[in-house]
Amino acid sequence: MTGAYIRGMGLSCALGEDPEKCVSAMQRLQVRPSKVQLDELTEPLRMPYYRIPDPRDLFDSARFECLMQPVVHMAVEQAGLTAAEIRQLPLFIGSSCFSIGLSEIRYAAALVHRPETALPMPVCGYQDIAAIVQQTLGCAGDTYTYNTACTSSANAVLGALRMIELGWYPHVLVIGVELANRTTLAGFSGLQLVAESVQPFDLARGGIVLGEGIGAVLVSAVKDDANVLRILGGASNCDTSSVTTANADGNSVAAVLRQTLSNTRLQPQQICGIKAHGTATSTGDTAEAVGMRRVFADLPPVCVLKPYVGHTLGACCVTELVLFASALENGFLPATPGFKTPDPELDIHPLKASSSAPDGHYLLNHFGFGGNNTVLALEKTTS
Amino acid sequence: MIRVVSASHYLQPLHDEEPLPKLDDALRELCREDFRRTDRFIQLALLGSARCATGYGLQATCGVYLGSGLGPIGNNIVTQQQLIRDREIPKPFNFINTLGTSAGFYIARNLGLRGQNIFISRRSASLEAVLSIAIADLMLGAVGQALVGVVEEATLPLAAHRQRQGLVEALPLSEGSHWLLLEAGDTGGRQIQLMRFADYAALEGFLKPLRGSGARLYCTRGMETRFAENLRQMFPDNARQNPTVAFHDSLEAAWLTQFLTAGGLDKLFMVSGDNVRGWTLFQFSA
């Protein structure tokens, strides 16, 4: 694969409303989860949550549209596309929430005001994000909406790269969206996967902390003078041992890492760093650690970004890609704030302090429910 | 070269006041495990994919490409009722199965696959979206085989199902599971090609010489009327031969797999697009 250049990026997450602010916050090791409560449940829930800073109520229906608009504008404006290019722009979207939050709000309101006719899932389907982005940007190209759990936006990136490779599209806007909704919060609580803090690969790791994120990446076959980052390609596979996590034997993780290296014609020793998925769940981190150890005799520096922004689920690839790419542009690999005590069984030591990020190749790992594993390779070239 | 080596077609018309047909007996014959924590969407996906794959040697790296307009809507309804109406935490398997990708997991497990596993939606055009992605992967060698399907589940009461989709009252509804097994290489079966045209003039230029060839052309929903009418005039047998089927969100897939499983047709075109996003033509030829 020849890959595609990153021409524009937009981001909104717990660290801030644009990539520059987020990079600055990462350099300060800013970790600011807030709290979320679902008091209306028979057994009320309270948990830490990385919300996008925003004065509105967390479950305000207006957030869905208002938070998305500036992010996609930012990515497209940075890329400097012509009006005609924007008009034809295809959208590749990855999300695990879609408009479920809107559906919850409308159903709850209907149960109060007209319970006899209240319709559960009044907003259904996956098209709302694409419709909002098309309206926001005035674009009318093809849309592809991915729902492969936490690999959704990673698979969207991979799909976009392949279409670009074939020459079907010159530019693609890839978007990842995860916004607060009750289904996700209560669902993960019911699975008993939620912890009080994010401690990836740590001996004391106890699970995930959820977060919001909206990321957008404009990828293009054409390089401009400012480009230093190219997504080379990647690979994806399916591990059918469990619907919720990759097998702890690391086989499927090792396989997707090897396939990524093969597809991008890279050798393990050429990798300068890995952005790990690092959910901080017991089995998830074990599978990832064992898989990485199998492929790399000498593991390159590893960092995890979830301590900064939480697990943004279907949006995590694009959200973390923008964070990671912005850090690389600024010359550093981010530290992993939640990591303190190594787990001797994993033998993975994420960076405790940021380190320099040389020109070269980097991997980004993503794993999700449904046995979905997707890895991307990124190239940084400044000279 | 990419070939359609197998196709399966499950389309079930539904009637108000009647229960949805049970799928258990068919699944017992087709599945190598008794998958207990599944929902109707997953069952429909298992049914169609297994029928399509039966008798063909699937490679373990065969990709699964599942499309749907509404996805697992029935399970999402149950989960939302548990959470919002009953104020309870959703049951774990209900929550996990709210994801479209859960069905892909069960398909892969049932067929012993470990390749790429994708769920994609494009309202009213999920087949086109998922088929395009699968063909791209086959062309680039990312997969050697691709099991491509769309699944649309219905929920009861059908009046509410229509209301959710903004459909007119009493529109006949169906649910379906429609699948193609695609393979790279000259392995027998119909050839499938995806062609892209920047504008209508280029598309027309390609199609004009094929008038009178007995090919059938199929315009997908949402096409601007002037283009659809022009295309139908070029292939006048089209309207007469299009079967009438009860509605679900991926109707194109129902038409396509019905033709492919019936056989006897040399060439079929499926066309979609406009002059902004460009035109996509899928060509199926013997």
Image: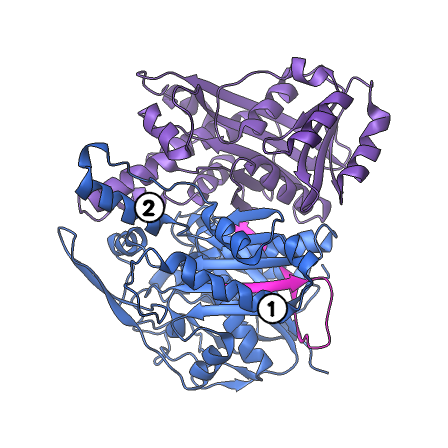
Chain colours: A blue, B purple
Whether A233 is among the magenta residues is: yes
Of callouts 1 and 2, the N-terminal one = 1
Residue A49, by quadrant, is bottom left
Q: How many marks?
A: 2
Residue A226 horizontal side relative to residue A22, left or right: right
Please determine whether, in this image, residue B95 is positioned above or below residue A59: above
Residue kind at label 1, given as amino acid type: Glu
Task: Output the chain of dot 1.
Answer: A
Q: Position of residue A291 (x, y in %)?
A: 50, 63
Q: Nearer the viewer, residue B224 or A264?
A: B224
Q: Nearer the viewer, residue A36 or B147?
A: A36
> Residue, x 62% and y 38% (percent of image)?
B131
Q: Nearer the viewer, residue B198 or A292?
A: B198
Residue B2 horizontal side relative to residue B128, left or right: right
Please determine whether, in this image, residue A172 is positioned above or below residue B234: below
The residue beneath circle 1 is A77
The residue beneath circle 2 is A103
Residue A361 visible in this rendered orientation of the protein: yes
Secondary structure beneath label 1: helix
Secondary structure beneath label 2: helix
Q: Residue lying farthest left?
A: A42
Whether A237 is among the magenta residues is: yes
Q: Are marks 1 and 2 in contact (CB under 8 Å)?
A: no
Residue B4 visible in this rendered orientation of the protein: no
Give residue A112's mark. Answer: none
Q: Which region of the structure is painted magenta?
A: A215-238
Circle 2 packing at 10 Å, graded few (<14), some (14-19), many (20+), is: many
Task: Output the chain of dot 2.
Answer: A
